[in-house]
Image: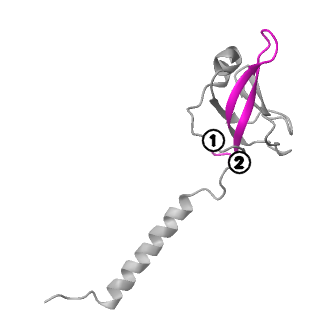
Amino acid sequence: MRTRPSRPVLLDLTASGALALLVMTAAVPARAADLYGKPLRGLSAVPVREVVKDPARYAVKAARVEGLNAGAAGSPALKDGEAVLPIVSDGSFKFPGDLAGGFLAAEGRARAVAEGSGAVFVATGVEVRREASR
């Protein structure tokens, strides 16, 4: 003979499930990243200092750079030690005016600025996270 769980047991299981769901959703960040341009493809990040040191190497194929925005309003840039890499749009999107404190992940290609004076990263897409926890 098969027995059925009593009603209080079913309610207890339902309450446990609701609690588990609440805990799982609390761990999810309140805000997803803001996307500008094309969606990122999930490339492995390259250190900013490497891109600044050898932009020709990262001009041939798509690369990803990421870090805290170190640029002025409307002019995002990533900094790695003394190396600073300005991020510019490929023309398919515009950056918002205020990216202060944002964590940027950009995919695109590097371009040398002038002989020996660094590089610019031409982004096809940028994700911006505003959480300081990154």
Q: Is residue 130 in view?
A: no
Question: Which comes sooner in the sequence, label 2 or label 1?
Answer: 2
Find residue 25 and report its image quarter: bottom right
- Taking the spot 57% from the left edge, 39% from the top edge, the residue there is 42
Q: Is residue 134 above or below residue 119?
A: below
Q: Which residues are magenta?
A: 106-134
Q: How many marks?
A: 2
In this view, the residue farthest toward the top is: 115
**Vertical relation: 134 (above or below) 65:** below
Disc 2 marks which amino acid? Answer: Leu
Q: Residue furthest left?
A: 1
Residue nearest the viewer, comparing 69 with 128: 128
Indicate yes or no whether the magenta region holds residue 53: no
Q: Position of residue 131 (x, y in %)?
A: 68, 48
Q: Where is residue 45 drawn, in percent x and y?
A: 59, 31
The kind of residue tagged 1 is Leu
Residue shown at 35% from the left, 88% from the top: 8
Percent across and percent down for residue 43 are 57, 34
Residue 35's tag is 2
Which x, y percent locates residue 86? 78, 28
Residue 50: tell me if it is visible: yes
Quickly name the residue at label 1. Answer: 40
